[in-house]
Image: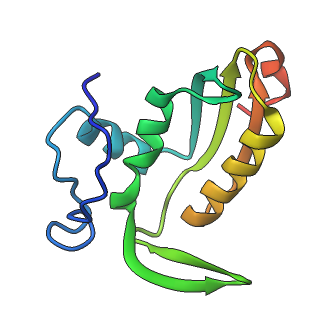
Amino acid sequence: MNIAHCVGCNFCWLKTPGICVFDDDYKQLLEKIHSAEKIWLISETRFGFISFQAKKIVDRIMPLLTIYLTCSGPYMRHVTRYRHNPDWGVLYIGDGDKVLMSDWCSRFTSNLGVKSLGVYDILHVEEADL
């Protein structure tokens, strides 16, 4: 798929709320993400973390959020644009740092106001709640 990197222009928050400025293949993907119950990000690992291709998918999730912030315990979180967002998990291939990726997945899903499904080595996929 042809998916551009997020450039942080904030158009999806300010100028075209909920719609990314890039007209690429991510538009179709975002619609599927928004309507799903669970998302499993499957990625090779580089330097112990998910690949840049997988990170691109996560970074472009911003249209599901608004520019507005709210307090959630000791943290500031973006208010979600829609009532429903899917829970997320990671299946990784390679020599990933599971602790690092688990912490990141937990923080990422907390920002979306959803549940982390966890992070699992693809060799132990049976442990995941698919």
Q: Position of residue 94 (x, y in %)?
A: 71, 14
Q: Is residue 98 above or below residue 116?
A: above
Whether residue 35 appears in this view of the structure is no
Would you say 50 lies left or right of 125 here?
Answer: left
Q: Quadrant of residue 33?
A: top left
User: Is 76 placed left or right of 84 in the picture?
Assistant: right
Q: Is residue 101 visible?
A: yes
73 on left or right of 53: right
Q: Position of residue 77 (x, y in %)?
A: 56, 75
Q: Residue at x 24, y 60 (%)?
A: 9
- Residue 28: image quadrant is top left
Q: Identify the residue at horizontal 80%, vertical 13% (top origin).
A: 123
Residue at 62% x, 56% y: name it. Answer: 109
- At a point 78% along the width and 31% down the height, the residue shown is 97
Residue 81, x across and y down, in percent:
38, 70
**The N terminus lies in quadrant:** top left
